[in-house]
Image (cartoon, rainbow, N blue to C red):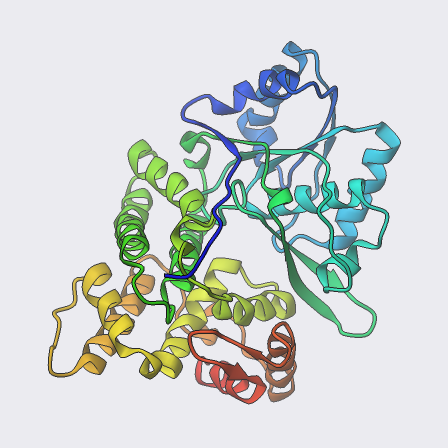
């Protein structure tokens, strides 16, 4: 087991009506004026936004709405939010939605607390430990951004095209997360399934490691993966199954708050592969991961077939072939693909709706490799050539 630090200060307010408690929560911390940041029309159509406004007004909190968040949130929109916060003397950012709204809120908070160009932060030219106060209300079980230290944005650059990049620091963990599973009842099936796949991947990216003697982290991870494996289907069959929705929502937070990574070192190679698909084709995040994971797995599994065999047995109930661990490992990868198809998730780029040209494959491979200085993947190191081959074989 590797040395590690585990830090998760976010207060979780979980259950029915959680969104109505945000006003009192913000007031108790002494803040006076809130930016309510969200995307789409869902919040208005369902009355959720009215409940949030009423909670803030009851607590004596002023607020300014700022909508317009889109999937794979744009840094240009973030900068508009920063300018609005400065104009309105905002002292607290409340993100409402899924990972896109919460990450966009975190990025605004970075911009409000610092004077540098935000692009420099996300492309690695500068760092910071300063951020304005952030809280959130989650409306989808997926990214776990409500308790994570990660912030992911899409940047439209002048010289390198569109980049999807992240900045990770514990200062970005929200002060609180209000989580009401009922707010996920009306999600389209595709978003429910994509969110569930994203939860699986956040744990799987940590699980596939060369670290030894991490039995507790393994068992926590396997329990989480089995739970998500089963509950996504239940939520799709009955969208108002509260217990299924609650388990998915809580799993999303636990999967990405750092718990399942304790004792391990990893660098999320499949996310880096998928991010380039989201940047170039605006692909849904969770779907970009399912479309490429099996190809990545078949590329790297021989580096530690026992790890993949354990995944097959513990998560998907594959019978262990003691005489041929590679056969068991491949059976687990195939079981993952069957699960993805059962919930309507793509397992190839063609199914994802992305058919890149050779030039686009080379560009995505170069950009993905550059996030690790030319190579990514601590489980199995991959360079630009390897990554290009993964994109090709994933078609």
**In the image, residue 144 above or below residue 388:** above
Residue at the farthest front position: 3
Q: State the image coordinates of residue 349 (x, y, percent, origin top left).
A: 47, 74
Residue at horizontal 65 percent and vertical 49 percent from the top:
70
**Residue 87 appearing in the image:** yes
Residue at horizontal 44 percent and vertical 37 percent from the top:
184
Q: State the image coordinates of residue 209 (x, y, percent, origin top left).
A: 38, 68
| Numbered label tally | 0
Q: State the image coordinates of residue 371 (x, y, percent, origin top left).
A: 63, 72
**In the image, residue 72 above or below residue 24:** below
Residue at the farthest right position: 87
Observer-nearest residue: 40 or 116?
116
Residue at horizontal 53 percent and vertical 34 percent from the top:
10
Q: Is residue 293 left or right of residue 44?
A: left
Q: Is residue 280 left or right of residue 330?
A: right
Quarter location, residue 200: bottom left
Q: Quadrant of the N terminus?
A: bottom left
Observer-nearest residue: 223 or 391?
223
Quarter location, residue 161: bottom right
**In the image, residue 41 above or below residue 196:** above
**Residue 239 appearing in the image:** no
Q: State the image coordinates of residue 230 (x, y, percent, origin top left).
A: 25, 50
């Amino acid at each position: 087991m590797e040395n590690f630090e585990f830090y998760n200060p976010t207060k979780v307010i979980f259950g029915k009506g959680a969104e109505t408690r945000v006003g009192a929560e913000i007031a108790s911390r002494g803040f006076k004026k809130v930016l309510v940041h969200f995307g789409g029309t869902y919040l208005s159509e369902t009355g959720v936004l009215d409940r949030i406004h009423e909670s803030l007004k009851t607590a004596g909190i002023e607020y300014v709405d700022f909508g317009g968040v889109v999937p794979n949130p744009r840094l240009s929109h973030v900068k508009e939010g920063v300018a609005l916060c400065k104009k309105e003397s905002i002292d607290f950012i409340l993100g409402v939605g899924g990972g896109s709204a919460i990450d966009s809120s975190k990025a605004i908070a970075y911009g409000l607390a610092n004077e540098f160009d935000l692009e420099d932060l996300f492309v690695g030219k500068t760092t910071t430990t300063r951020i304005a106060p952030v809280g959130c209300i989650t409306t989808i079980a997926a990214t776990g951004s409500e308790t994570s230290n990660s912030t992911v944005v899409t940047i439209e650059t002048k010289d390198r095209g569109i980049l999807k990049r992240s900045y990770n620091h514990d200062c970005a963990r929200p002060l609180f997360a209000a989580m009401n599973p009922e707010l996920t009842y009306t999600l389209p099936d595709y978003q429910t399934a994509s969110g569930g796949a994203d939860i699986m991947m956040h744990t799987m990216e940590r699980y596939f490691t060369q670290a030894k003697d991490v039995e507790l982290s393994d068992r926590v991870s396997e329990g989480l993966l089995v739970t998500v494996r089963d509950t996504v289907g239940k939520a799709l069959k009955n969208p108002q199954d509260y217990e299924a929705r609650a388990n998915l929502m809580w799993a999303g937070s636990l999967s990405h708050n750092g718990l399942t990574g304790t004792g391990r070192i990893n660098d999320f190679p499949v996310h880096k592969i998928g991010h380039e698909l989201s940047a170039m084709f605006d692909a849904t995040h969770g779907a970009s991961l399912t479309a490429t994971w099996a190809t990545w797995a078949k590329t790297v599994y021989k580096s530690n077939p026992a790890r993949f065999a354990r995944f097959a047995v513990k998560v998907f109930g594959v019978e262990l072939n003691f005489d041929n661990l590679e056969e068991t490992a491949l059976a687990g990868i195939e079981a993952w693909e069957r699960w993805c198809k059962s919930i309507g998730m793509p397992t190839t780029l063609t199914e994802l709706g992305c058919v890149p040209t050779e030039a686009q494959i080379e560009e995505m491979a170069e950009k993905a490799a550059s996030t690790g200085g030319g190579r990514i993947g601590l489980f199995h190191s991959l360079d630009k050539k390897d990554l290009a081959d993964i994109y090709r074989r994933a078609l």
